[in-house]
Amino acid sequence: MGQATPTFVLIVSDLSTKIPEPAAAEPPPISVVPGAVDPANFWPASLAHLVLPYDAAGSDYVTVAEVSELPQTGYVGYRTMSVALVPLADVDELLQSTASSGHEVQSNGPLPFVDDDGPPHRNGFWIAGIGREDRFEPVVNRWRGGDIDVLLPDNGLLMVFGLVPRNIGQADVHWDDPHGPVYDVVRVSTISDHQLPKEKRQRAFVEIRRDYLLEYCRIKQAAAVAFYYEQRRSNDDASFDAAMSGSDSKDFHLPGRLLNLQINRYADERGRQFAQVWGRRLVLPRGERKIFERDLPLVWPDHPGEMTQDRAGREDPKAYVNDLVLQEYEGRPEFVLFPKWGGMSYRGQWSVGDCQRHSRNYISVELRKLYEGCPSRVIEHWHRFAVPRAVAEADHQAAGIRHIGIRAEELVSAYLKLTSALVRLGERFDLSFEEVDIGGFNAYNVEYHGWCSFDSLVTLAKVAPPNITLDGFLDRVLDVAKLWEGIQEAPLRNMVRKLGIDLKTLPGARSLKLMGTLCQLATIARGSGYRWPEEAEQFVKQWKPETQLPVMRRLFSLNQLRQKAAHRTGQGFAATLASDLEKFGVASAAQVAGWGSAVDLLYDAMISDFAGIAELLEPDT
């Protein structure tokens, strides 16, 4: 027997597969639409929104796939849409032809039938074009499992940009570009379950940032075209009835779409006029260079002309930026912030490190280091917050150098000083509490690793611009209150008991009241000349639970503010808020331009009080 001739199978998965075929029938002519002056542009009222351009150029995101039963301009119905990449040479024909095409993503599945003696199963996704063998590459892969539609971004798209997933909800995934980093490049709600009641069905969609889609179209040398099906119902559209001219159902072959209109003679609550359309719409006509190999024609204040890496290296210029630049990185665990200096780093891959705080609200940065080590998107981000040096100097003169980073560091230091004093106080009672038992932190570890490496501490240094809102201020109240609430009740309760206080005289006492009791006793001891805390038997006789101490006054007000921050409405909110704020030297009426100065006063007051309490409770030597 002779050797069998090998069989080669060509798998094509590029934008378009065109196989020679017999000449196809001519597409139908543009239909006549009774009552329409321009049939090619006719739309019934329920579908009139499709006249608008698909892509709103002012939007950061483009929807590239969707399954939705949401009403549109008041008309109930259904929409399914997928975007595919179409070679530039085929776009005009696809959009102008009256010939039909696919409107859904197709695949060899689910549950393909494969003969054991036949060829193996071949994966792939495509949208059928006008020609019998035309197949366009979808941006999103789709299939249906039972009554559930599944939408996922194409792996090729995700791979090109090196995107990584991040789960947002039960069925939502966002894809990030770690090279920027750029978050939420692709946003996906993956499933739509048609078994659920209509009001509970989830809109499934895939959205991508415009700049990334433009770049993808550029490298694919293609346009983005939406293939869609949509149906809507209406009742009183006169143009609809005119187009039907007495018929129950009519097809209209129009450029880029097939429109079917039907009249339901037995009208129900959904509407007697039913319109459905299969069509194609242009999303992006061509690509643009947006992501890869980008030049940065940036002009920095005080440095006329475009700044380049070479120029930055030669001139070693300095720029000044508003510290709002740091908000982009706050609350994201992959970044390490250095609030005292105004710098940050990303996963050890790059950093903006050559920074100095110039004033309360501005940071100076060395452009040579910025251009040498940072991705272009990071440079652009910092450039957006750049100001002339004169602006930073004016802020230095008006607001000084004390900024949120300094205040946060001093607040943390005062808090640790307080917990250390409590440890030493406990030792006098033979109570073996450690700092972490009392306040949640070990001072040595905080100093060794840096306070800004602890999530619950670095949040205290979030940027506090002068025009921060009242809600923003109340959020800071919560942050400071959470720090204070780290003081545990059990150690304080044991110390109060060791001092000879019957805890029945302090029913329901929590950390704040227990700390106040310790401060009351320490004040009596020091004022009466007794050793603190050894001579408790003598000074505890003078204790009066109702005594109010200046050093505790603002902590009680902080607690009141915390409750207001958690419940920001209600009768008398403004009046009682003003009363509590007065304890911190904050006048509500003076915060018209913003609550930034109130944040400063809040922090400064708590720094002083934490340090004052620590000094008061420090055992006598």
Image: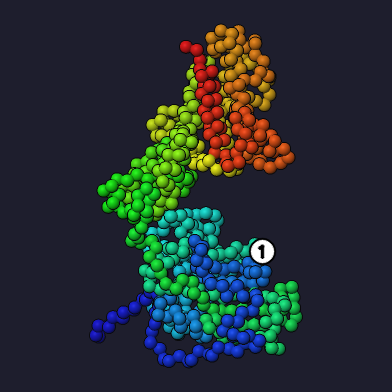
**Residue 114 screen position, x and y as percent:** 44, 76
**Image: 233 above or below 444:** below
Q: Is residue 135 visible?
A: yes
Which residue is at 43% across, 51% downward?
384
Q: Quadrant of the N terminus?
A: bottom left
Along the horizontal axis of the image, is 401 left or right of 296? right
96 vs 316: above or below: below
Residue at screen point 54% across, 22% down: 613
Asked if 335 appears above or below 197 in the picture, the reply is above
- Is disc 1 surrounded by few (<14), some (14 to 19) or many (20+) residues within 10 Å? few
Q: How is the image coloured?
A: rainbow
Q: Residue furthest left?
A: 2
Left or right, 303 with respect to 621, comes to left
Disc 1 on helix, strand or loop? helix
Q: To which quarter of the image does residue 482 belong?
A: top right
In the image shown, does 310 or 446 lie closer to the viewer? 310
- Residue 108 seen anywhere in this rendered image of the structure: no
Compared to residue 134, the image places residue 598 above or below, namely: above
Which sits in the foreground, 475 or 450?
475
Horizontally, is 595 left or right of 392 in the view?
right
Which residue position holds label 1? 199
Q: Amino acid at mark 1?
A: Glu
Total number of numbered labels? Answer: 1
Q: Is residue 609 left or right of residue 296?
A: right
